[in-house]
Image: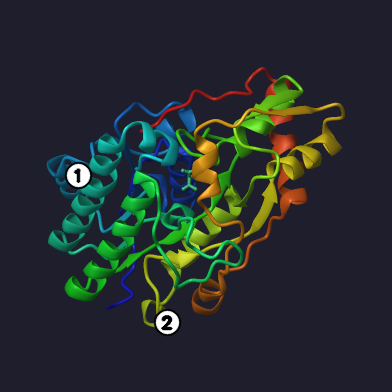
């Protein structure tokens, strides 16, 4: 496998929580015109809309992907389009269609168009209740209970198959819950860890849909972007794993998160009313061993709970003061 340069990039799910910030980071690095944002809805904000090309695609329909790859002479794909865990339980057929057929189409397109490199993320949702709960190892039991998790395990296996069988350079990480201040997440179980900040700033109170003692692995967006870009920069020859890297930054309970926010927002009240997402959260690990990522491509996170909370609240409070706390959500 060669380490050819990435020059013309396509991002699927470019209006989503990670896709939107990843697209801007890639445009900063490679130039706006060289990074094509794609999705099935118009980009919500001017930043994404005006900084480079946008194309409508439906990843589950191969021809829509092929057209854009040919039109823009694409050599690299960041495949961020996915249905997440909570919506995946409400709409399991849609979850299978978008996550599995979408991934298959991206991998087949990569093979047919001889793409240089593809990023296909997995998630801690690949794990299940039989997986060791603490310091979950890289190689472990993968028996998820959600449709989203099923598609992530199958997806990891499919990506590795394309690496071995067809020499496609596919890479990916098992993202923990991602916390960010720009685009709201949509349809995940870890969404409470983002919503709590917005509600703390706007109302000084939040009703959380998981129990106070629920501990999950989490990461701040700047670290998630760094991990994504660093793995894609890594020398292929130094990688033992490809599309299933464990990735960790911090783990905390919902109660600890509320207590950290209270240090900045005195009087902040958090109540707990667990719903169906509690069972999903309970099936996932509490902490992750990411030593393979550290060894193979030098992964190291920068943000802990305290640093993330200071930065999140600073950004959200400034937007709130300007009357722009909520940016228009888009789940493309
Ligand atoms: C979700 O909660 O579904 C996602 C994930 C952990 O992959 N944030």
Residue 61 horizontal/vertical position (percent) = 16, 40
The residue lying toward the viewer, choosing from 255 and 182, is: 255
Q: Can you tell which quarter of the image residue 157 is in?
A: bottom left
**Which quadrant of the structure image shows residue 312?**
top right
Which quarter of the image is occupied by the C terminus?
Answer: top left
Q: CA distance from mark 1 to mark 2?
A: 30 Å
Image: 259 above or below 133: above
What is the crowding at mark 1: few (fewer than 14 residues within 10 Å), some, or many (at least 20)? many
Q: Is residue 173 left or right of residue 332?
A: right
Neighbours of disc 2 within 10 Å: few (<14), some (14-19), many (20+): few
| Residue at the bottom extreme of this rendering | 237
Measured from the top left, where is residue 95 in percent x and y?
A: 30, 40
Identified at 55% across, 37% down, the residue is: 191
Residue name at image x 18 percent, y 45 percent:
71
Residue 327, percent from left and from top = 54, 25
Please provide percent x and percent y for residue 196: 67, 32
Q: Which residue is mark 1?
A: 65
Q: Count the labels in the image.
A: 2
Secondary structure, mark 2, is: helix
Indicate left or right for 174 with 41 as reference.
Answer: right
* The N terminus: image quadrant: bottom left
**Label ID, residue 203:** none
| Residue identifier under label 2 | 238
Say left or right for 228 vs 286: left
């Amino acid at each position: 496998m060669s380490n050819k340069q990435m020059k013309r990039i396509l991002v699927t799910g470019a209006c989503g929580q990670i896709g939107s910030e990843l697209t801007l980071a890639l445009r900063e690095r490679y130039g706006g015109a060289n990074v094509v944002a794609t999705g099935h809805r118009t980009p919500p904000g001017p930043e994404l809309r005006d900084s480079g090309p946008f194309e409508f695609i439906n990843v589950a329909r191969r021809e829509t992907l092929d057209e854009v790859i040919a039109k823009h002479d694409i050599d690299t794909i960041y495949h961020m389009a996915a249905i997440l865990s909570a919506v995946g339980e409400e709409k399991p057929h849609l979850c299978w269609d978008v996550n599995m057929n979408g991934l298959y189409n991206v991998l087949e397109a990569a093979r047919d168009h001889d793409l240089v490199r593809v990023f296909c993320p997995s998630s801690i949702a690949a794990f299940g209740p039989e997986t060791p709960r603490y310091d979950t190892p890289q190689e472990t039991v993968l028996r998820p209970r959600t449709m989203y998790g099923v598609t992530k395990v199958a997806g990891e296996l499919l990506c590795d198959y394309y690496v071995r069988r067809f020499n496609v350079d596919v890479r990916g990480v098992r993202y923990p819950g991602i916390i960010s201040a720009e685009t709201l997440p949509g349809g995940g179980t870890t969404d409470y860890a983002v919503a709590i900040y917005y509600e703390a700033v706007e109302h000084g109170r939040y009703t959380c849909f998981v129990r106070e003692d629920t501990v999950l692995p989490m990461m701040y967006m700047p670290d998630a972007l760094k991990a994504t870009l660093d793995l894609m920069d890594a020398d292929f020859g130094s990688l033992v794993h490809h599309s299933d890297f464990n990735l960790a930054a911090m783990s905390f309970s919902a109660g600890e998160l509320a207590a950290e926010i209270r240090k900045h927002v005195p009087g902040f009240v958090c109540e707990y009313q667990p719903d169906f997402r509690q069972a999903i959260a309970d099936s996932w690990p509490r902490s992750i061993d990411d030593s393979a990522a550290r060894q193979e491509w030098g992964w190291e996170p920068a943000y802990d709970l305290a640093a993330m909370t200071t930065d999140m609240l600073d950004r959200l409070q400034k937007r709130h003061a300007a009357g722009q706390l909520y940016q228009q959500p888009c789940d493309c």
